[in-house]
Amino acid sequence: MAQRVRSRPEGMKRRKTLVAPPFGTMKRGWDAGSFVMRGLEKVRTECSVTVLAYNLRRVLTLVEMPQLIAALRGAGSGRNGGGEPRQRAVE
């Protein structure tokens, strides 16, 4: 792997700008460096909630509140006519 990284340094540079900052923010900025829960399913849930919180904070930083509210209202009029919650596919 080290050889692959050395042969394409631009790939690592791009990774550092796209992937590393969110994890650094979650680990150090939010003091979420380790998982509190035990067990794969619980850890997955904890990780999902942390990533969801990160994404919501990013949206609130990048989008003005009136634009966000308008977009959310528009999202309710999707394929099923709005109002009714969408049915999840059974996995």
Image (cartoon, helix red, strand yellow):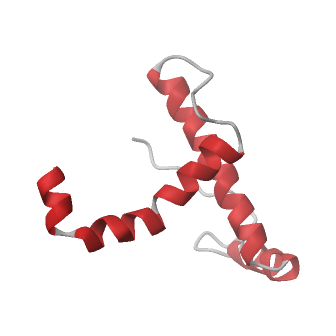
Decide if residue 56 is on the left or right side of residue 10.
right
Q: Extreme top residue here?
A: 38
Camera-side residue: 23 or 63? 23
Query: Would you place residue 32 above or below residue 79 in this image?
Result: above
Query: Would you place residue 45 above or below residue 63 in this image?
Result: above
Identified at 18% across, 62% down, the residue is 6
Query: Would you place residue 84 above or below residue 24 in this image?
Result: below
Can you give x and y, in whole percent of width and height, for residue 29 in the image? Answer: 70, 47
Q: Answer yes or no: is residue 2 visible.
A: yes
Can you give x and y, in whole percent of width and height, for residue 86 in the image? Answer: 61, 58
Can you give x and y, in whole percent of width and height, for residue 64 in the image? Answer: 82, 80
Q: Extreme front residue here?
A: 6
Number of residue marks: 0
Q: Answer yes or no: is residue 84 visible.
A: no
Camera-side residue: 4 or 78? 4
Identified at 59% across, 34% down, the residue is 33
Decide if residue 88 is on the left or right side of residue 78.
left
Can you give x and y, in whole percent of width and height, for residue 3 in the image? Answer: 12, 55
Q: Extreme right residue here?
A: 66
Q: Quadrant of the C terminus?
A: top left
Q: Quadrant of residue 66?
A: bottom right
Identified at 76% across, 78% down, the residue is 63
Identified at 14% across, 67% down, the residue is 7
Decide if residue 21 is on the left or right side of residue 63.
left
Query: Would you place residue 60 above or below residue 47 in this image?
Result: below
